[in-house]
Image (spheres, rainbow, N blue to C red):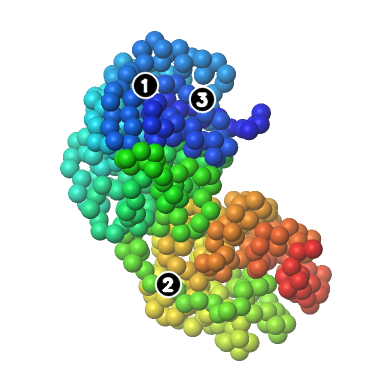
Amino acid sequence: MTNHTPKVWIIAASDSAGASGIQADLATLRGLEVHGGVALTAVTAQNSQEVLSINPVATAVLRDQLRALRADGDAVAIKIGLLTDAEQVDVLREFLCAYSGLVVLDPVLGSSTGAGFGMSVAALKSLLPYVDVVTPNIPEAEQLADRRISSPADMLSAAVRLRELGAKGVWLKGGHLGLGEQCLDLVWLSEQPYWFAQPRLSVRHHRGTGCTLASALAAFVARGESLLDAAALANAYVKQGLRQGYAIGPGPGPIARQGWPSLMTDFPRITDRLDWLDYAAFPDCGASSLGLYPVVDSVEWLRKLLPLGIDTCQLRIKSNDLTLLEGAISEAAKLGRQYGCRLFINDHWRLAIKHGAYGVHLGQEDIADADLNAIRDAGLRLGVSTHGDFEWARAATIQPSYIAIGAIFPTQTKEVRIVGLEKLARWVALLQDHYPLTAIGGINLSNMDVILKTGVDSVAVVSAITQAPDLRDAVTNLSRKLLKGWE
Ligand SMILES: Cc1ncc(COP(=O)(O)OP(=O)(O)O)c(N)n1
Ligand SMILES: Cc1ncsc1CCOP(=O)(O)O
Ligand SMILES: [Mg+2]
């Protein structure tokens, strides 16, 4: 921790067992290098088997703690857990009126050991207009939204209701729903709802999952992640912890809290369409890495590049002129076949299918509009652009042929979100055993060493090829660098 360590406030109760409550929250924050300030709402006496008592902190004491925290300067995010009564809610509402960071409310209405906490549902509802993300489980959502939830459609309708009640974002945890081998959460934090799917883990030690999810979400946002990226990370964080939970007594123990998720398989499958969860994988791109992957905007470029031995290439024409597109894509597909080059067509998947191109490259926005079944059934490969943890997890759900990561550096070629080297390295470590990867954006010979140091083995380039003084030299030098690795 340093003077620049981001700060999150936890407003919640202590758990004497150290499995949930502020103990879980602070352990989560610490592992993610986030400082935690605390306003305690109650002291609970509990262990792995039962809750013995819940002892509310006096309203004035809660108010004092909040005043003390605020005097040091606002935190980036607040996580609210167990509140004991309507008076505490009143204090909090007043406090939140003058707070502009992220507010995550985990609406505790019962514990995983089965105890009810007796909090008024009406009082909790009155907090929703001050909340950016509310994270109820199914029984809590049923109480807050005042309806039965027994299907994904019911989850959606409950989330609509919670948003009508004022919550800006809803994360409805579906673990209690009997959906077979799958746990399905509804995560509605932006304009559009998404489903986060995880295989159901049958583990003995699961205490503190709700607290941990909410505090991890706050922590990842405090670490500078976007809300959706933080959601993907927080979900993976809990799964990682569930796999490594441990006993503290005869009853169920806590989940482990172990820093940034390090396995791709801990991330959720993310989709806006439930039928995509049953998708078959796209065909692979063969054994060799994608290597040097030029992205060019005309057939003329392909005619110059393919004879130089380029074996992955993309035609990216930003035009709506159908005649031009049809001619170019048909010719490009032919050239690809002639030279044995893995020729991808950007955006225009229908024409790519029609002319038998090797594959299609789509951006995140394009995925929703494209007919993925048609692309795969026609035997085409699919590459997908990603700029964050949410996006790569969403891309991985449809099992594409490769994943592109970028823009790594600022680029003149396109206005796009910059990822940087640190994230590239983290994603390469997560993904490289599962998908071919390529890095794109601002890459040229002079920064290839730092790119290759992240472990990525392919680079997609536009200007390093199209603006090179000598095309043959550029191809030779970039390819050689890729073969040799970083120095
Ligand atoms: C290899 C590779 N990576 C990323 C992109 C960007 O694709 P997209 O997000 O669809 O944006 P546009 O290229 O359409 O502007 C790409 N084309 N190739
Ligand atoms: C299409 C695209 N997608 C992300 S960055 C980028 C442009 C890369 O161009 P350059 O290699 O010139 O930086
Ligand atoms: Mg595109």
Residue 37 screen position, x and y as percent: 51, 25
Residue 136 in view: no
Indicate yes or no: mark 1 CB to ligand 1 under 8 Å.
Answer: no
For disc 3, the neighbor class at 10 Å (few under 14, some 14 to 19, many from 20) is: many
Which three-letter amino acid code belongs to the residue tagged 3?
Gly
Depicted 82 relative to depicted 446: above or below: above
Q: Give the residue at mark 3.
A: 37
Residue 400 in view: yes
The answer to whether 154 appears left or right of 400 in the picture is: left
Farthest residue toward the front?
A: 250
Which three-letter amino acid code belongs to the residue tagged 1?
Val
For disc 1, the neighbor class at 10 Å (few under 14, some 14 to 19, many from 20) is: some
Which residue does the image show at 32% across and 45% down from the upper left? Answer: 173
Quarter of image, res 403: bottom right
Which residue does the image show at 28% across and 32% down from the upper left? Answer: 50
Depicted 283 relative to depicted 19: above or below: below
Q: CA distance from mark 2 to mark 1?
A: 50 Å
Contact check, label 3 and label 2, Cβ < 8 Å: no
Q: How many marks?
A: 3
SS at mark 2 in the image: loop
SS at mark 3 in the image: strand
Which residue does the image show at 42% across and 72% down from the upper left? Answer: 281
Q: Nearer the viewer, mark 3 or mark 1?
A: 1
Q: Nearer the viewer, mark 3 or mark 2?
A: 3
Q: State which tag comes first along the sequence, 3 or 1.
A: 3
Depicted 376 relative to depicted 97: above or below: below
For disc 2, the neighbor class at 10 Å (few under 14, some 14 to 19, many from 20) is: some
Residue 43's tag is 1
Between residues 397 and 85, which one lies in front from this camera angle?
Answer: 85
Q: CA distance from mark 3 to mark 1?
A: 16 Å
